[in-house]
Amino acid sequence: MRLLSELLIASSAVSALFLACASCGATGSNPPVRTAVDASAYSSFGVDLYKELIKEKPGANVFISPASVGFALAMTMNGAGGGTRDAMANALGLSGIGIEAVNTADSTLIDRMNDTIRAVKLSVANSLWARRDVAFKKDFLQRNKRYYGADIRVLDSAAAINDWVAGKTNRKIMKIVDQIDGDAILFLINAIYFKGTWTQEFDRNLTREEPFHLASGATSPRPLMRRTGKYDYFEGDGFQAARLPYGDGRIGMYVFLPADSSSLERFHEGLTGEKLNAWIGNLAPRSGTVGLPRFRLEYEAVLNQSLSALGMAVAFDEKRADFTRMFEAAGANAYIHQVRHKTFVEVNEEGTEAAAVTSVEMRVTAVMEEEPPFEMIADRPFFLAVVDRETGLILFMGAIVSP
């Protein structure tokens, strides 16, 4: 076994990628033929994003959900126009594909991820938190509600957003927004929660403290779980790969372990989305023993720099960003102020629990155009009605002629 930090990073990346590859890697079979708009696009995007993030903090744990980031940006892309939409689509691996096709494919993916799976809980939730005094285009809101099942809510407090996030992640992620700036007009939030029991659990009695070799050359004791059985397995150029399934086997964790003579850095050099899918397709049943550290970690990153490096810098540009398809008002330039990503993962003898949240914060650089203030003084007879907005039921109504 090589370095703890290396295996944690490798396990983290693969654990995140299974969320975007939930249907791939069936036992002893090649991956299904994919169209241009499906989970494989987010897999490739995830690998590219992952490689950018490890550049920012070399040697640190990285744990992301390509699916969460992808869905949040796709929702945002519904409000983008011109070169901004093209740049976002290109970064997501969706270049040249119409927004309707993207939305339809994402809707199907979300429905499949929310399917009932034995011994697995997997859920995807989306929400839009819009400022009350901004006239957003109905088409933009309806698209996100229809295709992404997004809750449309009023942007009134960070606490309300964080409560929603905590509820959708089984309280594994408690906070994604620190405060709401006066220029903020919209938060687009995606949350993914996963909890899966291994198809074959690790025996706690076989877990032992063993030395784990760190990148520095030092060793550190860690609880190492062991399990012997038949696994989908593959030996590539300088690494081993094994699949550990959950529940009925639909979802599995793919662990890629660099050889003693190699390193995680060298593995990263050859890692691409296309190669990852090919490696997964090469796994075949083989008897053996798997050792995996028991671990728990939390990860957080602001993705602006990495996403800009992938080609969507224009979306963050206060002057050049084009989100005119998002709202009706003129006289303001909307742009993405921040894309923030948080994750949690715990791997133990029973299985894996993981959660991810992505927040896209939109701001404006100028005051939104507002109609001039009105004046209504009820100093003459008037009519009133008390109405339940939820049901449309009129509770009270009447004419006030002489108050």
Image (cartoon, rainbow, N blue to C red):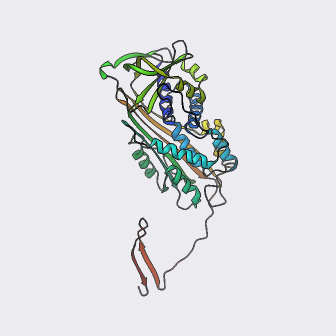
Q: Residue at x 66, y 38 (%)?
A: 311
Point out the image quarter for the N terminus.
top left
Q: Is residue 77 visible?
A: no
Q: Measuring from the top left, give residue 11's x and y in whole percent.
A: 47, 26
Q: Measuring from the top left, give residue 316's x and y in whole percent.
A: 63, 45
Between 230 and 293, the one lying in front of the other is 230
Between 83 and 235, the one lying in front of the other is 235
Point out the image quarter for the C terminus.
bottom left
Q: Measuring from the top left, give residue 73's x and y in whole percent.
A: 57, 44
Q: Residue furthest left?
A: 205
Q: Is residue 323 visible?
A: yes
Q: Residue at x 59, y 59 (%)?
A: 137
Q: Residue furthest bottom?
A: 402
Between 285 and 260, the one lying in front of the other is 285
Q: Measuring from the top left, give residue 227's x and y in whole percent.
A: 37, 20
Q: Residue furthest top?
A: 261
Establish if 51 lies above or below 101: above
